[in-house]
Amino acid sequence: MAKTKLKEHPREAMSATRILAAQAFSRAAGAPLVHGNSIRLLRDGDENYPAWLDAINSAERTIYFENYIIHDDKIGRQFADAFIAKAREGIRVRVLYDWMGSFPEASGGFWRRLSDGGVEVRCFNPPRLDSPLGWVSRLHRKSLCVDHRVAFISGLCVGQMWVGYPERKVPPWRDTGVEVSGPVVADVVQAFFRAWAETGPELPADELPDRDSIPATGMVDLRVLASITATAGLYRLEQLITVLAQKTLWLTDAYFVGTTSYVQALRGAAMDGVDVRLLIPGSNGDLRFLRPISRAGYRPLLEAGVRVFEWNGSMLHAKTAVADGRWARVGSSNLNIASWLGNWELDVAVEDPGFAHEMEQMYLRDLNNATEIVLGRKNRVRPVAMTESTAPAPVLSGGLGRRRGGSASQLTAGAIRVSNTVGAALTSRLVLGAAEAKIMMSGGIILLSVAALASLEPLLVTVPFVLIAGWIGISLLIQAYHLHESTDNSTVSDNIDDRIEPFISRDEPFDETLLEPPAEHPLDQVPSKHSLKNPVTIHRSD
């Protein structure tokens, strides 16, 4: 009897571990794992925009579109014409744009033309007297839903730069998106409903589909990460993935400014033998001031063995991650505080080996057009010794692989001996400069300038402070009055949360596959409705 219990105990314990792992993923992300979907990887504007327009042109009932920036240029007008054409056919077309993102890029006439054409247009979070700091929270999402049938989630805004300027020989921005179909489309529609309700009257409840009403289209499992201000769902999930990764963690980000805790998580993974890579924009980034800030954070990453690459082409705007060949993320969220805590973001986390393989191959192709950043020998920290059992697994053929036998240090030393410039040109490596000194110097100059201005012309400092403090005080009184009035009224309008299944703490139904033998590593411990022995349905782009 005792022997029987000893044999059953490990299996029961691991089943409990798998349940806890699934629960941790769901609660960290604030989103359940949805089964029965198909997904297609879309690269750059050349693949994303035509797919978007084809879906819009095929719409028969509804079109929901939200985007941070919509430019009033050739591409923007192309989408405006498509929206207006469908609205005139009687299709319900709703467009949601962010005030800060689109304010300098599209005029009032652009939005009036859409409205006059029958399109319902709303602006997210414009400046208000009663909310002086409301501009901090932005709608940074990029999504399109058509007929509750297909949805697109990406990092692409709408503008000519994502297509490029061939006449000026300017290549397009590098970006990534996905097309999804199946029950998960209901979650994308639900995310749009929440954002739309922030800007005015809510949409009719009967327009919100249930997952059960949308038929399965494949066997891909994924989560829709619809982040809102101060929820930090993606941040918690990214930390969890970083902790659980055992072989690889490859990140692409447009505006990387890692927090201390996230940098420590990346460092810990790299020092534990995980192949951690970070691909970010190079000298052609659209926010030039952000490059030295990002570079200031390279040193602790490089010292721990994280490999950092800068993109050599035009602006790199993609926001993606792929881990251990089975988990991947694509969407609008950058690896910084603004995306993690301030903005409304939308990403999709995919738990599927086939899709993860596509993401890995795309990442390796991107590295062919990138320059690796390394530390000089005098700044080099000795790497953590790894035994054969803890060494990372070999990377896909054709990849750059992990450094062996101190090859990175040798290449760096050789580049220094020949010269930094020639060495970088020959080895595609750069020696990291003292970016931290530039940041400190800039901060010191700014603070000294403010101090000097305050001592010479006190009114130039005190008057703006008084105006801002007065504005905030008035806004607080206005909000307190509205809150008091709403409390006194016995009838309060139903909130959209009463009709939409909440994102936070949603329990997934128990899956019998939890009783299967354990997987090889933690990222395999999330229960899937389908065994990997079954063929995986992946729609690949041409």
Image: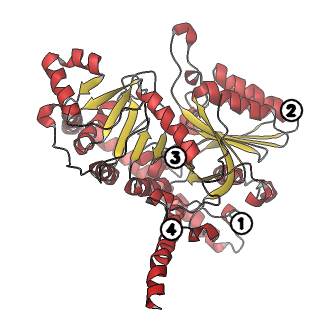
Q: Is mark 4 on a helix, strand or loop?
A: helix
Which label's residue is closer to the chain start, 1 or 2?
A: 2
Q: What element carries label 3?
A: strand
Residue at the disc numbered 4:
18
Question: What crowding class fits label 2: few (fewer than 14 Cα within 10 Å), some (14-19), or many (20 or more)?
Answer: few
Look at label 3 and name its amino acid. Answer: Ala
Cβ–Cβ under 8 Å for marks 4 and 3: no
Q: In this view, does 138 lie above or below 495?
A: above
Question: What crowding class fits label 4: few (fewer than 14 Cα within 10 Å), some (14-19), or many (20 or more)?
Answer: many
Q: Position of residue 27 (x, y in %)?
A: 52, 65
Which label's residue is closer to the chain start, 3 or 1?
A: 3
Residue furthest to the top in view is 167
Q: Is residue 323 above or below residue 477?
A: above
Of discs 2 and 4, which sits in the foreground?
4
Measure how far apart labels 1 and 2 are at the Cα level: 32 Å
Look at label 1 and name its amino acid. Answer: Asp
Measure how far apart labels 4 and 3 are at the Cα level: 19 Å
Residue visible at 48% across and 46% down?
325
Residue at the disc numbered 1:
494
Residue visible at 46% across and 42% down?
334
Q: What element carries label 2?
A: helix
Measure how far apart labels 1 and 4 are at the Cα level: 38 Å
Cβ–Cβ under 8 Å for marks 2 and 3: no
Which label's residue is closer to the chain start, 1 or 4?
A: 4
Look at label 2 and name its amino acid. Answer: Arg
Which label's residue is closer to the chain start, 2 or 4?
A: 4
By what rule are the colours in the image chosen?
secondary structure
Q: Nearer the viewer, residue 410 or 212?
A: 410
Q: Where is residue 297 in the image (x, y as percent from the top left)?
A: 28, 40
Q: Is residue 477 above or below residue 386?
A: below
Of discs 3 and 1, which sits in the foreground?
3
Of discs 4 and 3, which sits in the foreground?
4
